[in-house]
Amino acid sequence: MATIDLVVPRSYLDTNDVSAGRRARVEALERYDLSSITNNLIDKGRYFSPEQIWPLRDYFGRVDGEIAGLLEREFRRFVALTILEPGYMYAPPGALDMYWHFFVLHTRDYARFCGEVWGTAHDHGALPKDIDDTRSPAPMPILPHADTIVLVQDISLVSQEIVSGLKEEDIRKIYILEHWDLSFFTDRLVEVEAAEGNGRRFSPEQAWPIVAHFGTASREVAKAIEEEFKRFIILTLLDESRAVVTSGSIDMYLHFLILHTKEYREFCNAMWGRFRHYPFVSLTDTSDVTIKEDFMRTTSFYRTIFGAMDEHMWCDPTLELVA
């Protein structure tokens, strides 16, 4: 039997009267296999995903198996702190936060981890960036008491011809989606342009590939990504049987929303009536070839519903950096 690395020295547990329940959680943390997360947190040379690579590479000068292993070790130690002293509010340093964010984006794995180690769902609601930041996400819009035909007339993301032929339930969801104010997320996505040397390497890490791809992370770019994100969600509503794949840039918006787990859960319930794990499509073959094929089908479906697309916005999610 393989030896389990001790996250917390047993001498500490023995001399500090740690309860049996907390000991059991520490042991669950030590047993939990994080290798799939750690092994995938390695630079693939892409613009997008894992976006955490950009600030980590800037900070450490490289991202490889050794760095990823160190981050895993420190993440375990950070979680141990939350188990041993649950009454305190702990905040991880920026580099460690990147490992945590990457883990959260694997929603099935993360949910299992939370259940086995913390014993509860671990929501990350929207927090203020500083003491003077009083903003909060806008609530889901209230659906007006109106006939479906009135709702159709107030939808612009989808042509009147197509939307009028949809089921009433889908029309109502598209109306809610179009009128949902996501500016809280859109604004925050680009508040820190990491590439411009303002001293903040981490969070939002999605700004790095956005800057690299578009040349800027302006609010204009962010609003355009938001609109295409909403169109992507509409595609998932119209045919859930399709392997709908996001563009690399739109994936950044989706990732940023998922990291706000409380708000993402509310969004899921409103759009699909259930929590939708990411990635949306469960594939046995996750090779670049499969992703490219699904992406081509997605863009074809997009043109059927919305017409011409912005090819720069809808870029291949496996797009690689050119040296």
Image (cartoon, helix red, strand yellow):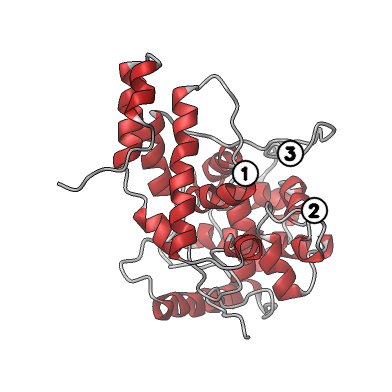
**Residue 115 in the figure: left or right of residue 99:** left
Look at the image and tell me in which quarter the C terminus lies: bottom right
**Residue name at image x 81 percent, y 31 percent:** 131
Where does residue 137 sit, x and y in percent of width and height?
A: 72, 39
Q: Badge 3 is on which residue?
A: 138
Where does residue 14 sit, x and y in percent of width and height?
A: 33, 19
Q: Residues within 10 Å of mark 3 (few under 14, many from 20)?
A: few
Vertical placement of residue 91 versus 220, above or below: above
At label 2, the amino acid type is Glu
Spatial distance from mark 1 to mark 2, Cα to Cα? 19 Å
Of marks 3 and 2, the one in the foreground: 2
Vertical placement of residue 52 versus 288, above or below: above
Q: Residues within 10 Å of mark 2 (few under 14, many from 20)?
A: some
**Residue name at image x 36 percent, y 22 percent:** 13
Spatial distance from mark 3 to mark 1, Cα to Cα? 28 Å
**Badge 3 vs badge 1, beta-carbon distance below 8 Å:** no
Give the numbered dot on residue 93. Answer: 1
**Residue name at image x 60 percent, y 62 percent:** 60
Q: Say whether disc 1 or disc 2 marks the residue closer to the N-terminus.
A: 1
| Relative depth, front residue between 293 and 80 | 80
Quarter of the image for residue 45 reads bottom right
Residue at the outermost left position? 1
